[in-house]
Image (cartoon, rainbow, N blue to C red):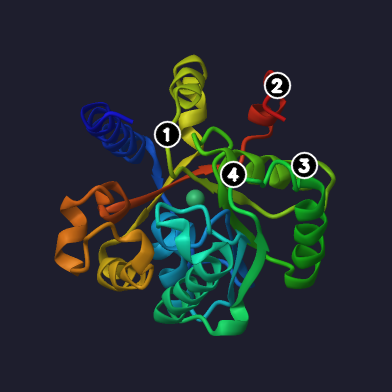
Amino acid sequence: MNPYLRSVFRFGENILHKSYSLCGSPHTFQTRQGPLLIIAPHPDDETLGCGAAILSAKQANRVVKVIVISDGAKTNLPQKNGRQSIAQRRVQEVTTACTIMGLSAKDVIILGYPDKQTHQNKDKIKADLRRLILEINPVEICSPYLLDRHVDHVATAQIVHALCVQGIISCPVYEYPMWFSLRDIVYRLTHPFTLRQTKRVATQNFLFTKKRAFLAHQTQCVGTHEVDHLHTSIWARHFGPYELFFLNDPQLANDGDLQ
Ligand SMILES: [Zn+2]
């Protein structure tokens, strides 16, 4: 994408994130007992989208499990070292990041499906998630946003919605937006009452550790290796005062051809 267009996109996404945060009601992951499950399409989504949620739940002594769907091998790195080697590096990075956030290696479950092929592997991933959710028995789930721009995020959200419809998931699901899409803007403008389902989690007490955890994802830091640089870098909205979540909306899954 043209760099000018990219910066316009990022500016727009930052404004949307701020606007939704202002509309949202405060939420904490410290009130419920029982496991919190984070579902991440790629290594680093757990930290960028849910770092403060994870850290606040750990502060309340909750069990937190992270499931990473893909191997993250189709990243911006030169592919000359081969997919396997990049995938191994990204697994190490996500394990280190989660360790920094207070999880142990056994709390991080890597499914290892090929990056950008979630849709093609939907049935297998759905079976894996079904098994793991029944095993973990979470009381809250953080999952990608159905109206995200990234195909893997959308496909993962669709799988989670299907598991809700089938009754495998009966606990609250909080969807975290990573990349905003035009569909999101259109949907919110035409369904403004859904903004009441927006939740914001204050990052204040957890921001420094969240930044340290993200820096463990060295392949994703794009030349930024200092905690102080993250609030001014392209990742700025992920290190602002709030993490943003939309309470899973069954109506959204039933709208048009989203399912
Ligand atoms: Zn992602």
The residue nearer to you, when weighing 240 against 105, is 105
Rounded to the nearest angstrom, the CA distance separating label 4 from label 3 is: 15 Å
Label 3 residue SS: helix
Asked if residue 75 is positioned above or below residue 17 in the image, the reply reads below
Rounded to the nearest angstrom, the CA distance separating label 3 from label 1 is: 22 Å
The residue nearer to you, when weighing 76 against 186, is 76
Label 2 residue SS: loop
- Disc 2 target residue: 257
Task: Tell me if the residue at label 4 has its CB under 8 Å from ligand 1.
Answer: yes
The answer to whether mark 1 and mark 2 are in CB contact below 8 A is no
- Badge 1: residue crowd in 10 Å (few <14, some 14–19, many ≥20): many
- For the image, the number of numbered tags is 4
The answer to whether mark 4 and mark 2 are in CB contact below 8 A is no
Residue 248 in picture, x, y percent from top left: 61, 41
Mark sitting earlier along the chain (2/3)? 3
Mark sitting earlier along the chain (4/1)? 4
Mark sitting earlier along the chain (4/3)? 4
Task: Tell me if the residue at label 1 has its CB under 8 Å from ligand 1.
Answer: no
The answer to whether mark 3 and mark 1 are in CB contact below 8 A is no
Give the numbered dot on residue 180. 1
Q: Which label sits in the foreground, 3 or 1?
A: 1
- Badge 4: residue crowd in 10 Å (few <14, some 14–19, many ≥20): many
Give the numbered dot on residue 152. 4
The residue nearer to you, when weighing 41 against 147, is 41
